[in-house]
Image: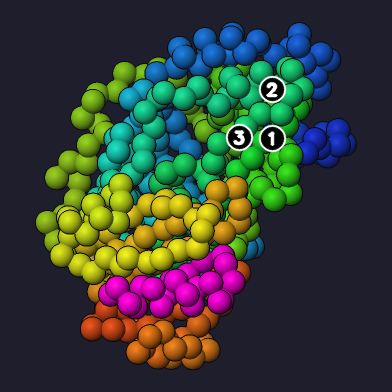
Amino acid sequence: MGGCDDSRTRIRSRLLPILVVTALIAASGCSAYVAPSNASADLPTRTEAADRFASLQTLDATVTTVQTRNNETVTTVVRKRHRLDPWAYRDRVLSVNQTEGARAPLVAEGGVVVVNASTLAFYDPASNRLHRATIRGSDGSEEPPYPRLVGAARSGRSVARPTVTPGVSSLPRVPVDAGTDSEENGSTSYREGNVTVAYAGTERVDGRQTYRLEVTPTSTAMSLRSQTLWLDAEYLYPIKRHTEFTAHGDRYEYTITYRNVTFNPTLEPDIFRLGPDEVPESARRVQSESYESAAAMAEAITFPVPEPTVPEGFEFESASYRSTDPEFATLRYERPNAEADITVSVFGTVSNDTSGTPVQIGPHEARRVRSNGTTAIEWVADGYTYRVSGGVDADTLVRVARSVAETA
């Protein structure tokens, strides 16, 4: 397929004026925009869309991701081989470019990411580390979102939009599970809700005909700000996406473009396993695990697991443990349908940071800091660093922190 420069974008949630679209087409020279005459006539029905999507089993493509986080940009190019059901993919990183100050991507150039159902493995040559983790994969039981969005565009009705952060994407680093590792952002829930979908005509992307859908959140409380999807007309798969959202106190913008796409290639099953020959013997191994409850994690690891008392309305969301670099255990609680969560973590290292406001947590002299809209309270006890953070008021965090200190 022709290699045109589609870096000009997914536009998420608002229709572009025709003059702007015309200017973009002229600048790129690679796609033609056709305004919709009648959405019902131009788009397939929801059933037809579902049938087309169901006919897609695998794909092979070169994928360019441009992520801007708070005005810092990382551009990655990967060779992606993807199986939809059972869900799996392999990304080989071909190139990485980033602006000064931008957070390094999950995997550097030459690295590899493999996801197979509930297991994630990735090797980063920059750090010479092999990471393995359990994840929440897709079981295929839910209706695919793209035919549903086509149906919403035809009917004019709003539709529930699942979390779009955007999934367990290998590159660049996204706030799927920020935990409370010191290298990550503070934790604020990704707020879901309903969206409206507008059909914006057809457009060619890398030589393939697509339906362009503009997705708009129905509430300003949602994390989603805007999204544009270019769905391949044959398979209803998004071969281009532009997404803007906020999460963990940061502003994100993604443009993901698929080029040189082969639909339904034959992929051998072992392609979704990371082979021993792909990782040097000298690589440092990091293991991460997820658990259904704090009690289950406490039984499985020889590491402190707190027993916090959280305010009414908060529900247990996840428990996770990482074996090294640094070793830590994390509990997360969320208040459904609200911008509020609480994360409790224990690190196997002692923090020497003395910044922040002093606060007494039981017998411990703690410090309170605020960053990216998130407040955190941290203290050291018995050779471990304890941290309680979240998008709640300081008094609430203090009460939770004191409950942790009482049970630690």
The x and y percentages for residue 3 are 56, 32
Return the residue at label 2.
Answer: 152
Q: Residues within 10 Å of mark 3 (few under 14, many from 20)?
A: some
Q: Secondary structure at mark 2?
A: helix
Q: CA distance from mark 2 to mark 1?
A: 9 Å
Is residue 200 shown in magenta? Answer: no
Q: Secondary structure at mark 3?
A: strand
94 relative position to 304: left or right:
right
Residue range highlighted in magenta: 388-408
Q: Secondary structure at mark 1?
A: strand
| Among the two numbered marks 1 and 3 on one chain, the one whose residue lies closer to the N terminus | 3
168 relative position to 329: left or right:
right
| Among the two numbered marks 2 and 3 on one chain, the one whose residue lies closer to the N terminus | 2
Q: CA distance from mark 1 to mark 3?
A: 6 Å
Name the disc covering residue 128, or none.
none
Return the residue at label 1.
Answer: 195
Q: Residues within 10 Å of mark 2 (few under 14, many from 20)?
A: many
The x and y percentages for residue 270 are 21, 30
Residue shown at 40% from the left, 24% from the top: 140
Name the disc covering residue 161, or none.
3
Query: Pointer 1 and pointer 3: residues touching (CB < 8 Å)?
Result: yes
The x and y percentages for residue 177 are 42, 54
Q: CA distance from mark 2 to mark 3?
A: 11 Å
